[in-house]
Image: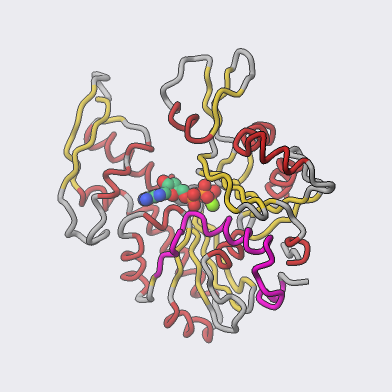
Amino acid sequence: MTVSLEQLRRCHFAVDLGAARTRVYVKGMGLVVDQPSVAAMNTRTGALIAVGELAERMTGRTPDYIRVVRPVAGGTVVDIEMAQRMLRHLLGDKTRRMLRRKPRLRAAACTPHDADPLAQRATIETLVGLGARRVELVDTLIAAAVGCGLPVERPEATMILVCGAAATQVAVLSLGSIVCAERLPVGGEAVDHAIVQLLRHEHELMLPSQSVRPLQIALSGNGLTPYGPTSTEIHGRDVATGRARSVLVDTAAVRDAIQTPLTAVLDGIGKVLRDCPPDLVADLADRGIMMVGGSALLPGFDELLREATGMPVHIAERPDVCVVQGIGAMLEGRIEPLALGPLAA
Ligand SMILES: Nc1ncnc2c1ncn2[C@@H]1O[C@H](COP(=O)(O)OP(=O)(O)OP(=O)(O)O)[C@@H](O)[C@H]1O
Ligand SMILES: [Mg+2]
């Protein structure tokens, strides 16, 4: 996937359609949308009832005739029509009217590192449905590296870890291009799911995955190492009686439960390091790993990586919006043409 910076500079807006959140950057305006990738529809009339935060709050709380849907899954648009409707609503009338006035509307979108042609097509079609006459695709890893200000143009290796909801992508970049990369199908959703399963099996308590955050916060302070608060109270529904109940959950048990997805990420990093030329690995030992994506905020994740790899680990300043800000910077022409070797025309 190579796209010229010149083409990107001509784009009017950029979209990052994530499994958890949808973000839109409009040239000259900045980040205008940062909302959950969720839509709620009336199954009787087919009408859209809510999108974004509001629709997410409806999850699990709707009557039969309202369905809450997620048009993006695993980093891919799985329901093109719904994704278009969701984006139209999220953009709002004013921004849409402004974009419609452009004579030849051009859009940019980021796609996961190893997105297959079908997934790329789905992203393009979603934006064409929004009126884009031309759509440029950018590798998420490149956008993320630009967004967090990594010096990708230099002949020194940098490692980036994009911790999303559905997937974690890891890459070594040098001279503006990807030297080696892996995409692992585990992310924030897998971590939440592991905690939900723990509560179900150990405490016979059911609760939605959006409610496990207090248990993750308990991992903070001393991270995934065993010194944080020893237990946290959490409310849910008893599996057998259906009644509301609260339990005290052991922090150590939560730490153990999320080991499986986190180990998969560590294995992925190991593989990228093994595939990487030795000279670049030496650079990485100095420069370390830059973490971006919403799941980079998982308390103690950085500490775990530091311990497992022995390398310095940094979390980007606003890890959640790095990717979209990266494409935004390319749209605004804030990147020197020389900065991205193969990406430049
Ligand atoms: N403070 C936090 N602590 C732990 N996890 C967090 C925090 N904030 C966000 N997350 C997790 O980050 C994920 C969302 O990250 P992000 O917005 O990068 O995902 P996405 O871009 O929608 O997903 P993908 O790129 O995989 O399609 C969610 O799974 C969410 O649970
Ligand atoms: Mg993402």
Q: How is the image coloured?
A: secondary structure
The C terminus appears in which quarter of the rendering?
A: bottom right
- Looking at the image, residue 257 lies above or below residue 90: below
As drawn, which residue projects farthest toward the right?
103
Kindly indicate the quadrant of the structure image that contains residue 243.
Answer: top left
The answer to whether residue 208 of the structure is visible from this angle is: yes
Q: Residue at x 52, y 59 (%)?
A: 322
In this image, 341 relative to 167: left or right? right
Number of numbered callouts drawn: 0
In this image, 103 relative to 35: left or right? right
Q: Residue at x 52, y 27 (%)?
A: 68
Q: Residue at x 38, y 48 (%)?
A: 191
**Percent of width and height locating residue 336:** 68, 74
Q: Which residues are magenta?
A: 314-342
**Percent of width and height locating residue 269:** 46, 67
The answer to whether residue 188 of the structure is visible from this angle is: no
The N terminus appears in which quarter of the rendering?
A: bottom right
In this image, 262 relative to 332: left or right? left
Q: Nearer the viewer, residue 264 or 250?
A: 250
Kindly indicate the quadrant of the structure image that contains residue 94.
Answer: top right
**Percent of width and height locating residue 193:** 38, 41
Q: Residue at x 66, y 64 (%)?
A: 330
Kindly indicate the quadrant of the structure image that contains residue 129.
Answer: top right
- Looking at the image, residue 245 lies above or below residue 170: above
**Percent of width and height locating residue 111:** 64, 54
